[in-house]
Image: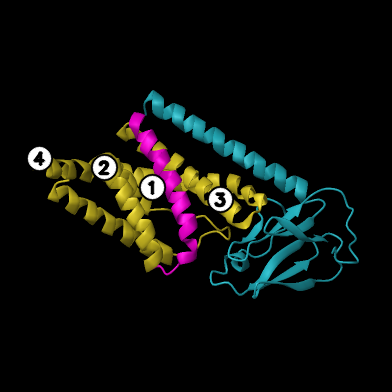
Chain colours: A cyan, B yellow
């Protein structure tokens, strides 16, 4: 391995380390006070305090003739079903931290878990 | 363009397409969308180095267009095209000053740019900036898969690069 290769390997290793740190920090911050935020086309359409859910919550998001069914349980959330052809969001399964959001590209729906202050009314399911 | 060069370019396009279609049949290894091996990039890298950038652009563009037709996934075309364009641009620039023994590095950076392009397209289409949280995860995955495909390309260059170069230069 020559010098240039070594430098390149070191830079790439540093990038991996930075990315791993970002994931770790985001994971830690968002796994204490889990608030799921659902976006459609960049706008917040619903917020749910996942930690204070006492029983499972299931609801449909219907836009332009397409439906995504979201299921939330204590501390986690998933896309239960979707009528898109690829089912990528459904196959992703549960998320319980903000490390990666769930994205339904064809229907432009994103579910992100945020950390932060406990200010959302859990009893109302956070509408 | 000589007939030989044209034939070799067509052959490489066919190879890239076959690799792409076969890879699309492999079930995803992780539940996170966007993670895949990207073996077809081996052909793009090989073509940039052995034939040139113009030919490599043709191979990549045709692979993306025909690939989404053959796999029947026209919805993913926008993301493939955005990722492919950025990946190709990055690799075309990097190969200017990185030698053949650094192909693995070109491949890694190309793979990272591929993900950046795809994410940028997803952010624009959905209007949701939060999708960028995928970037750290996808970058780590790009480094792993990029090293693998880069080493594959380096082995291919060592064994087949000389033969193809000789074949083309014979009829100048």
Estimate how packed mark 3 is, as few (under 14), some (14 to 19) or many (20 or more) residues with alpha carbons within 10 Å: many
- Secondary structure under tag 4 reads loop
Q: Residue furthest front?
A: A64
Distance in Å between CA atoms under marks 2 and 1: 12 Å
Q: Which residues are magenta?
A: B71-98
Q: Earlier in the sequence, mark 2 or mark 4?
A: 2
Q: Which residue is mark 4?
A: B172
Q: Tell me if label 3 and label 4 are in contact, CB under 8 Å.
A: no
Quickly name the residue at label 1: B149
Q: Are marks 3 and 4 on the same chain?
A: yes
The reply to whether residue A105 is visible in this rendering is yes
Which numbered disc covers residue B119?
A: 3
Q: Earlier in the sequence, mark 3 or mark 1?
A: 3
Residue contact at pointers 2 and 3, CB within 8 angstroms: no
Secondary structure under the numbered disc 2 in the rendered image? helix
Q: Main secondary structure of the magenta part?
A: helix
Q: Earlier in the sequence, mark 2 or mark 1?
A: 1
**Disc 2 versus disc 3: distance between alpha carbons?**
31 Å
What secondary structure is marked by label 1?
helix
Residue A76: percent from the left, percent from the top?
75, 62
Chain assignment, label 3: B
Q: Which residue is mark 2?
A: B157
């Amino acid at each position: 391995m020559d010098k240039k290769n070594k430098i390149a390997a070191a830079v790439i290793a540093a990038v991996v380390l930075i990315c791993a740190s970002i994931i770790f920090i985001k994971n830690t911050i968002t796994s204490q006070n889990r608030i799921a935020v659902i976006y459609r086309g960049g706008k917040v359409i619903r917020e749910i305090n996942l930690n204070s859910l006492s029983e499972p919550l299931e609801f449909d998001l219907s836009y332009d003739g397409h439906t995504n069914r979201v299921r939330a349980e204590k501390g986690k959330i998933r896309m239960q079903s979707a009528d898109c052809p690829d089912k990528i969001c459904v196959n992703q399964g549960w998320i319980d931290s903000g490390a990666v959001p769930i994205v339904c590209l064809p229907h432009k729906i994103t579910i992100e878990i945020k950390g932060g202050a406990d200010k959302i009314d859990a009893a109302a399911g956070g509408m | 363009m000589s007939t030989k060069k044209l034939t070799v370019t067509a052959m490489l396009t066919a190879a890239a397409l076959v690799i792409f279609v076969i890879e699309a049949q492999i079930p995803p290894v992780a539940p996170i969308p966007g993670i895949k091996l990207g073996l077809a990039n081996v052909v793009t890298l090989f073509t940039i180095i052995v034939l040139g950038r113009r030919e490599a652009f043709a191979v990549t563009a045709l692979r993306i267009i025909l690939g989404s037709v053959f796999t029947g996934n026209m919805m993913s075309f926008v993301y493939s095209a955005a990722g492919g364009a950025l990946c190709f641009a990055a690799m075309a620039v990097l190969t200017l000053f990185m030698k053949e023994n650094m192909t693995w590095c070109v491949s890694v950076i190309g793979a990272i740019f591929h993900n950046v392009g795809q994410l940028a397209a997803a952010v624009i289409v959905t209007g949701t900036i939060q999708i960028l949280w995928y970037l750290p995860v996808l970058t780590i995955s790009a480094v792993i898969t990029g090293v693998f495909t880069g080493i594959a390309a380096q082995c291919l260059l060592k064994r087949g690069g000389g033969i193809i170069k000789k074949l083309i230069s014979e009829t100048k």
